[in-house]
Amino acid sequence: MKSILTLLFLVGTFMSCTQEPNTLSVTSPSGNNGIDFQLNDDGEAFYRVQHNNGTVIDTSYMSFDFQNQKSLKENLTILNATTHSLNETWEMPWGEQKEVVNRYNELVVELEEATAPHRRFNIYFRAYDDGIGFRYEFLPQQGIDSIIIMDENTEFQLTEDYTTWWIPGDWDIYEHLYNTSKLSDLDAISKRNHQDLAQTNIPENAVNTPVTMRGENGLHLSFHEANLTDYAGMTLKVDNETYQLTSELVGSDRLGYKVKRALPFKTPWRTVQIADKATELIDSKLIVNLNEPNKLGDVSWFEPKKYVGIWWEMHIGKSTWDYAGSQDMNTFIEKLNPTGRHGATTENTKRYIDFAAKNNIKGVLVEGWNTGWEHWIGFEDREGVFDFVTPYPDYDLEGLTQYAKDKGVEIIMHNETSAAPRTYEQQLDTAYQLMHKLGIHSVKTGYVGKIIPNGEYHHGQWMVNHYRKVVEMGAKYQVAINAHEPIKATGLRRTYPNVIAREGLRGQEFNAWATDGGNPPEHLPIVAFTRMLAGPIDFTPGVFDIALPTKPDNQINTTLAQQLALYVVIYSPIQMACDLPENYEGQPAFQFIRDVGVDWDKTVVLNGEVGDFVTIARKERKTGNWFVGGITDENSRELTIDFDFLDEGVSYEAVIYKDAADAHYRDNPTAIDIESLDVVKGSTLSVDLAEGGGFAISLLKK
């Protein structure tokens, strides 16, 4: 195929210049998605995307602006074009499914400027049945060893005014509520100065990705990027009048540019997932497929797990992260005066370990164990605050690690950086050596606050490279990374399977302390079709004490049944049972958390519409048991489950946890019914979901 395409292209170049410009095309294996590439009369590069013979992205131009070089935009010529096809199946060491099919057709276009300095670059287009991706490759230039990118101008020209689910293009944080609007009404600037966020920077009318859209005919598009490596994160500027999106890279005020790279290099992939119905977006594996294969080999040292921990009690005001209250940074540990409210004590941690061991929970997260919490937030000078190897006097790090091991439980390390990454990098090797020595194989990192040094942002190239350093250090010492306040997920978990989860959204903690009433019921039915398309989410479900008695102005805006459903719906290889141990004691519904899997052989999306509802079934790898979760927004609804996904010839005991008849996320959130029945492949079941409700089903092989 490669030689045929090249021949046709060469024939085309000798045709009369008065004819239509040459079009280079590639289609997906099934032919449903196609990409056309052309140059206009001025030598400017543009592309189009078709789906089922209809144009979904119209003429969209591609150019770059540089420092100390003219823009790479016009006077381009096509030197060559080749194609390549791949059809492989690769195995996830952990994930939503065991096997992933990676099947695409690729077009590589080699371009050169017709005028001096005759710069050359390539564009790679890949057409999949679930979407498309493309990236740029910058080639060596005579006398130049690196380039500085001031702007990447990649356009996505939409053909209609899509209904859009979006968060603003904040350079610092993704913890915004999703908005639903027409593209023409999208106003990101109005989301500036959020009172509940520790840091935020929204410079223009742009959105963060993934951003998901639905057209008038039901077509769904989701825009994102894959394999974000040594480059700035991409937001998308929105033209409300023309429905055009344009890439806007996160910049560095400190350095005065967006990206600096040594030549040659390839950019991240720009991706568009394309689906005829919403559920197909969740089915898509486009993002991970556009990343490189596993570089780490065997990662069996990390096991997917459920965990509990000393975390939620701080958010509801029961205890504190700090040991001694506000302290001068120069105060020595032996002079600290404990407040008596410190959560990460040896005694309290043993209580969580004992609870975990008794309830089939394999991990215990401990926040606030290390020195520095007295001066970590709200201060401009946070360099050198945290010590990532020194525990507070009331926390026996080594003794507790052994105590947990003896009970079949693993401590999950916590490293909050207070957005001072240089301090963290100075201690990275020492901190990760400590984890390795103790047999701790996962860490939750955090980056709350404005980045130090001033002028850098969480999503810029400098921080992208910092996050990667942490991942590589973790790989060196067999430590898996769960990053909070992270850079976005772009499928790196395929290449580095120690990238297990991240926050990167407005999480459960906002329900405990946000001043705007917490996450509304539509939040997670949107998240499932937006943020979750990027990768695993550490959302921390499992609140049973939904009324939050210590927080009279706050409440969880879900029913108890929906909290259970989230263990299936919102994917992560680590799932927290975030509530206090005493709130689970004597609760029959807690049995679902004991039973539910975290590592899956297969995933089936049964139904769903963005922002309304979604139901997902997953088959556990080790046991072959299935689990089903369904959630709804503020509207009650009836959903019918067809168990045709079950294995042939196997009988299952279905334990159903569902909203009681009088349940309501505000008025009666903990009302739940639990019932059992036998089901087989082909059985059906209708379930009523209350407002803000849900259901969870354990399907245990008999």
Image (cartoon, rainbow, N blue to C red):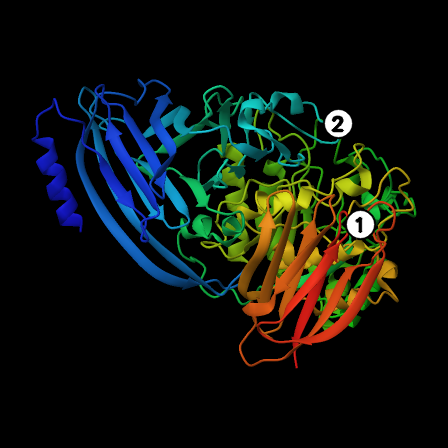
Say which quarter of the image contains residue 612: top right
Element on which disc 1 rests: helix
Residue 129 x %, y %: 38, 50
Name the residue type under label 2. Answer: Gln
Q: CA distance from mark 2 to mark 1?
A: 21 Å
How busy is the neighbourhood of tag 1: few (under 14 within 10 Å), some, or many (20 plus)?
many
Q: How many residues crowd mark 2 within 10 Å: few (<14), some (14–19), many (20+)? A: few
Q: What residue do we see at 84% from left, 43% from top?
A: 555
Q: Which residue is mark 2?
A: 195
**Who is closer to the viewer here, 186 or 353?**
186
Task: Tell me if residue 606 comes above or below residue 676 in the rendering.
Answer: above
Toward the viewer: 570 or 34? 34
Q: Is residue 408 above or below residue 483?
A: below
Quadrant of image for the C terminus: bottom right
Please identify the quarter of the rendering in which residue 307 is found: bottom right
Residue 60: percent from the left, percent from the top?
A: 35, 28
Question: Image height check: is 674 above or below 383?
Answer: below
Q: Position of residue 274 (x, y in %)?
A: 44, 44
| Circle nearer the N terminus (2, 1) | 2
Residue 172, position as x, y percentages in the image: 61, 31
Using the image as rendered, state which of residue 558 and residue 236 is in the foreground.
558
The secondary element bearing badge 2 is classed as loop
Q: Identify the disc placed on residue 650.
A: none
With 9 as the anchor, is 578 left or right in this view?
right
Q: Is residue 289 left or right of residue 7?
A: right
* Residue 372 visible in image: no
Q: At 12% from the left edge and 41% from the top edge, which residue is drawn?
A: 8
The residue where tag 1 is placed is 312
Q: Is residue 115 left or right of residue 327?
A: left
